[in-house]
Image (cartoon, rainbow, N blue to C red):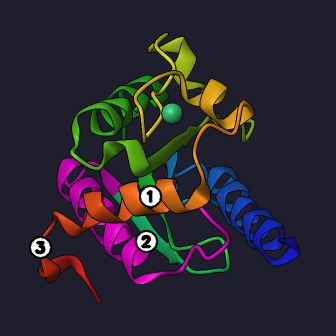
């Protein structure tokens, strides 16, 4: 667990470095993958799918691209020549409409280094990946086993072709 926290901290340092360069709006994308192992075949495949959809969605707007690897899984940092609101709207659109969008975690940061909250744009909380009900309640009440969640997530990822695997 310490390794994961440390990886998160290191990623945040990189994000702050990019923000301080003032080249544009900073986006950080990763996979919301359940369980302790964030670097599985399935999480890496899902990350490739996420990365390719963001590179194509933002292709006119990318100033800089950076890939990060760590115990917390892969992540993609982009600097975009878009304002924060447009970047966030487009990211929410991907999270809401891509078949794997529920697994995508796309953060847009403001100049102070704070991620813009999804609630400001879309009041509906994200649904539970297993049953579709309020995700927070399912986590609090421990409604699903880690095995059940992992299985659901991996089946979703398996429905994509092997060209994304590596
Ligand atoms: Zn649930």
List the single residue furthest toward the right.
2
In this rendering, the answer to whether 87 lies above or below 107 is above
Position of 51 with respect to 12 (left or right) is left
Disc 1, SS = strand
Please, what secondary structure does the residue beneath circle 2 have?
A: helix
Alpha-carbon distance for marks 1 and 2? 20 Å
Can you see residue 84?
A: yes
11 vs 29: above or below: below
Assign a secondary structure to mark 3: loop
Query: Depth check: 144 or 9 in front?
Result: 144
* Image quadrant containing the C terminus: bottom left
Q: Which residue is mark 1?
A: 78
Earlier sequence position, callout 1 versus callout 2: 2
- State the residue at coordinates (81%, 66%): 5
Which residue lies under the disc numbered 2?
43
Residue drawn at x 62%, y 76% as measured from the top left: 37
- Asked whether disc 1 touches disc 2, contact meaning CB atoms under 8 Å apart, the reply is no
Give the residues in magenta. Answer: 35-62
Q: CA distance from mark 2 to mark 3?
A: 14 Å
For label 3, the residue is 161
User: Looking at the rendered structure, which numbered label has been put on residue 162?
Assistant: none
If you read the primary sequence from the N terminus, does the residue marked by circle 2 or circle 3 appear first?
Answer: 2
Is 90 a magenta residue?
no
**Point 72% across, 41% down: residue:** 113
- Residue 67 is situated, as x and y percent measured from the top left of the image, at 48, 75
- Looking at the image, residue 102 sits to the left or right of residue 166; the answer is right
Q: Residue at x 44, y 23 (%)?
A: 85
């Amino acid at each position: 667990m310490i390794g994961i926290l440390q990886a998160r901290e290191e990623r945040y340092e990189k994000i702050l470095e990019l923000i301080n360069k003032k080249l544009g709006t900073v986006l950080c994308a990763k996979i919301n993958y359940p369980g302790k192992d964030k670097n599985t075949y399935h999480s890496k495949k899902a990350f490739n799918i996420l990365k390719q959809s963001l590179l194509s969605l933002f292709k006119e707007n990318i100033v800089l691209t950076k890939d990060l690897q760590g115990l917390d899984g892969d992540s993609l940092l982009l600097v975009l020549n878009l304002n924060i609101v447009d970047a966030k709207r487009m990211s929410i659109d991907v999270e809401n409409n891509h078949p794997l969008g529920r697994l995508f975690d796309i953060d847009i940061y403001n100049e102070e280094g704070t991620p813009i909250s999804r609630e400001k744009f879309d009041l509906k909380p994200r649904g539970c990946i297993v049953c579709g009900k309020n995700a927070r309640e399912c986590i609090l009440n421990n409604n699903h086993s880690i095995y059940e969640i992992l299985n659901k997530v991996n089946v979703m990822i398996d429905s994509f072709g092997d060209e994304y695997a590596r």
